[in-house]
């Protein structure tokens, strides 16, 4: 578990890892683009408001997964480094409005 008494590097936030309300996705050892593709597929199976914790070792996931979330509209609640792994806590976005009036 990371030591959060030190100031985390830019763009890294502590993650509430003790919470058990999240689906966990272990993508350690997979290389780009698989972590982002499997994260997208896992998010598609979640209900709005559910959480997903993704663990991966590919350094490009630090770019790819936040970019994926900007595309999907889902929220990055936290990002941390745990040894050699990057850990992301993601919250599935709520129901999107249809955009139709009336």
Image: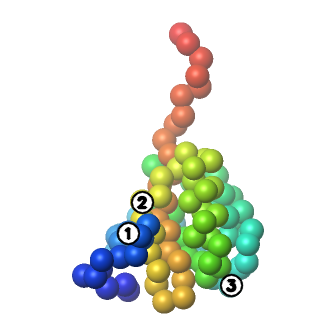
Label 2 neighbourhood size at 10 Å, few (<14), some (14-19), many (20+)?
A: some
**Between 26 and 69, the one nearer to me in the picture:** 69
Instruction: Give the labeled residue for mark 2.
Output: 77
Nearest to N terminus: mark 2 or mark 1 = 1
The location of residue 92, given as percent across then percent down, is: 51, 51
Going by the picture, which residue comes out furthest to the front?
A: 10
The location of residue 23, given as percent across then percent down, is: 51, 66
Q: Is residue 101 above or below residue 82?
A: above
Label 1 neighbourhood size at 10 Å, few (<14), some (14-19), many (20+)?
A: some
**Which circle marks residue 13 in the picture?**
1
**Which circle marks residue 34 in the picture?**
none
Q: Going by the image, does 9 lie left or right of 100?
A: left
Instruction: Give the labeled residue for mark 3.
Output: 29
At 50% from the left and 74% from the top, the residue drawn is 87
**Between 94 and 2, the one nearer to me in the picture:** 2
Distance from disc 2 to disc 1, alpha carbons, whole Å, reads 8 Å
Mark 2 and mark 1 residues within 8 Å of each other at the beta carbon: yes
Query: Depth-wise, is mark 3 or mark 1 nearer the camera?
Result: 1
């Amino acid at each position: 578990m990371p030591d959060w008494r030190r100031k985390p590097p830019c763009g890294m936030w502590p993650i509430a890892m003790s919470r058990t309300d999240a689906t966990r996705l272990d993508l350690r050892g997979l290389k780009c683009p698989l972590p982002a593709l499997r994260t997208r597929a896992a998010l598609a199976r979640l209900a709005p408001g559910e959480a997903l914790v993704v663990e991966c070792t590919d350094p490009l996931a630090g770019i790819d997964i936040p970019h994926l979330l900007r595309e999907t509209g889902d929220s990055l609640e936290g990002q941390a480094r745990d040894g050699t792994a990057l850990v992301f806590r993601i919250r599935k976005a709520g129901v999107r409005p249809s955009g139709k009036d009336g």
